[in-house]
Image (tube, helix red, strand yellow):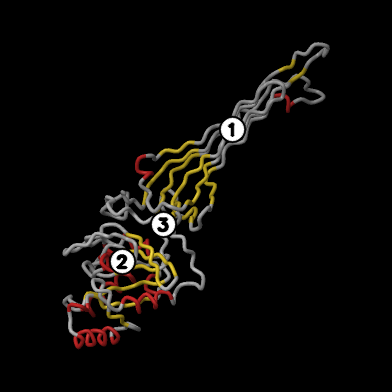
């Protein structure tokens, strides 16, 4: 399944139907009179947040959406048929932005949420509505209000309870595969994860969603590597899990780099609760693990969880800590559909679509 988290579309509401000019000709009615009906209302453009989606790929192939116009008014005082609303289904977590991306028009954060972006035009008046005591045979009518149209950006921010961050090759894909139903690609090279992954974790009778985003490197906020374009997918997380590779050159430096990129993102990510996990402890002895854990605490980590995504060591304690940040009752519905195991990944190289 292809992954796309931003798309530009053009939408247009339906115009109102024109009113009719008509005069009745009835037997035994000497003078007849106007009987032109009003036009029908045009269709609105409505966005609807639906479950079961976690990509905007459908909008890559369909960018233009147009609602139908209202029906024409007719004789015998018949009002034109109102057009049905055009309902555009988007994943939960989608933001609707103005064309210049300076204003958030709507944030679709709840399943079933509806947002009317453009209203259809009102139908025009028929000549029967113009009849007065001094104007017994009016011939004027209204054409109906014109349609509204605009271009908007759709930007998806996946909904997850916990988010994984870390340098490339920190073991995030192995970790999410071990604790959830996700099937992320694992490889002995950097950037095996090119797009965010979602997984549903079941632990001690609780279910929560965890998100894995591509690894960060120093300078990601300025576009280095894949950049920081996917950090938006963890903005809504309740807690972040920072994985650090114990086999790396300097775990303390690794923590500093990632923390610096989170702070540079300017979306209050540096203020989110953080759980630091020292990963791949199966590759080191206990003395080295204790030493690095102490150094990370001195560098600012509140608590360090020695874990191994490969063997499962320490993972239960880490998941217990994650549950502590969840609300008392957590919905068992996943806010997004986990990509297929054999799904194909696709990602743009820059967060800015206009670049």
Which residue is more in the foreground, 48 or 24? 48
Which residue is more in the foreground, 56 or 77? 56
Kindly indicate the quadrant of the structure image that contains residue 93.
Answer: bottom left
| Residue 343 tag number | none
For label 3, the residue is 336
Residue 243 located left or right of residue 154: left
Q: Nearer the viewer, mark 1 or mark 3?
A: 3
Q: CA distance from mark 1 to mark 2?
A: 52 Å
Of the image marks 1 and 3, the number of the one nearer the N terminus: 1
Q: Residues within 10 Å of mark 2 (few under 14, many from 20)?
A: many
Kindly indicate the quadrant of the structure image that contains residue 185.
Answer: bottom left
Q: CA distance from mark 3 to mark 2?
A: 15 Å
**SS class, disc 2:** helix
**SS class, disc 3:** loop
For label 1, the residue is 16
For label 2, the residue is 176
């Amino acid at each position: 399944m292809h992954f796309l988290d931003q798309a530009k579309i053009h939408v247009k509401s339906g115009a109102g139907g024109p009113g009719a000019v008509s005069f009745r000709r009835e037997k035994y009615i000497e003078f007849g009179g106007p009987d032109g009906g009003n036009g029908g209302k045009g269709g609105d453009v409505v966005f609807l947040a639906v479950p079961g989606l976690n990509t905007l790929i459908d909008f890559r192939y369909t960018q233009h959406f147009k609602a139908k116009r209202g029906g024409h008014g007719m004789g015998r005082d018949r009002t034109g048929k109102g057009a049905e609303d055009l309902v555009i289904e988007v994943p939960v977590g989608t933001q609707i932005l103005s064309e210049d991306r300076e204003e958030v028009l709507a944030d679709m954060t709840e399943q079933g949420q509806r947002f009317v972006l453009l209203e259809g035009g009102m139908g025009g008046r028929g000549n029967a509505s113009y009849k007065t005591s001094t104007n017994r045979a009016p011939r004027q009518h209204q054409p109906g209000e014109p349609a509204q149209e605009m271009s908007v950006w759709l930007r998806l921010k996946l909904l997850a309870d916990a988010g994984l961050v870390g340098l490339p090759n920190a073991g995030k894909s192995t970790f999410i595969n071990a604790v959830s139903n996700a099937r992320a690609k694992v490889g002995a090279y950097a950037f095996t994860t090119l797009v965010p992954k979602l997984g549903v974790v079941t632990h001690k009778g609780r279910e929560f969603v965890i998100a894995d985003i591509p690894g960060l490197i120093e300078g990601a906020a300025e576009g280095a590597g894949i950049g920081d374009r996917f950090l938006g997918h963890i903005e809504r997380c309740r807690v972040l899990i920072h994985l650090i590779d114990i086999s790396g050159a300097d775990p303390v430096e690794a923590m500093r780099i990632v923390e610096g990129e989170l702070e540079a993102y300017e979306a209050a990510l540096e203020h989110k609760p953080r759980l630091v996990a020292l990963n791949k402890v199966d590759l080191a002895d206990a003395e080295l693990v204790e030493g690095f854990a102490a150094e990370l605490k001195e560098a600012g980590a509140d608590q360090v969880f020695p874990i191994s995504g490969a063997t499962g060591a320490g993972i239960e304690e880490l998941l217990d800590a994650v549950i502590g940040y969840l609300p008392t009752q957590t919905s068992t519905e996943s806010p997004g559909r986990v990509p297929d195991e054999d799904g194909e990944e696709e990602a743009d190289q820059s967060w800015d679509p206009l670049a």
